[in-house]
Image: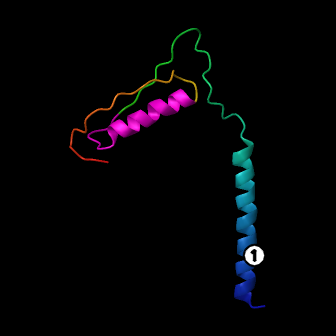
Amino acid sequence: MSRKTTVTILFLCAALFLGGVLFYAVMKGGNDRTDPTGNHGEKWRIGYYEGGPYANYTLTLRGVIKGLAKIGWIEDMVIPEFPDPWGWSW
């Protein structure tokens, strides 16, 4: 077996091992809870900042709202459709 083949095999084995370790760490989880926690009886304040004109702003904000509802931070709601200010069709 040539040196190049040996190095390639060792590299692939190391990559598979590290990939397995990372996969295990991600799948195992840990302290990555997303359920709402107490705030001494106060409501949490959640901010969303748009850093300037952004064509996908409404889609992104809609996704953030749906995501927060999915993990239980806010109640699910019907979000009305807004006209696209630039007239682009998606």
Is residue 53 toward the left or the right of residue 2 in the image? left
- Report helix, strand or loop for mark 1: helix
- Residue numbers of the magenta segment: 50-70
Q: What residue type is labelled 1?
A: Leu
Residue at (51, 18) in percent of width and height: 44
User: How many tags in the picture?
Assistant: 1
Residue with the mark numbered 1: 10
Q: Position of residue 9 (x, y in %)?
A: 74, 78
Q: Is residue 65 magenta?
A: yes
Q: Is residue 3 magenta?
A: no
Q: Position of residue 58 (x, y in %)?
A: 34, 36
Is residue 83 toward the left or the right of residue 44 in the image? left
**Figure coloring:** rainbow
Give the residue at the far left of this rendering: 86
Q: Where is residue 83 in the image (x, y as percent from the top left)?
A: 25, 35
Question: As rendered, which of 7 and 77 lies closer to the eye?
Answer: 77
Q: Quadrant of residue 6?
A: bottom right
Q: Position of residue 72 (x, y in %)?
A: 57, 25
Question: As rendered, which of 88 and 49 lies closer to the eye?
Answer: 88
Question: As rendered, which of 66 and 38 lies closer to the eye?
Answer: 66
Task: Count neighbours of disc 1 (C-alpha within 10 A) and say few if under 14, some if 14 to 19, many if 20 or more.
Answer: few
Residue at (62, 30) in percent of width and height: 34
Q: Quadrant of residue 71?
A: top right
Is the N terminus in the top left, top right, bottom left or bottom right quadrant?
bottom right
Give the residue at the far right of this rendering: 1
Above-or-below relation of 40 to 29: above
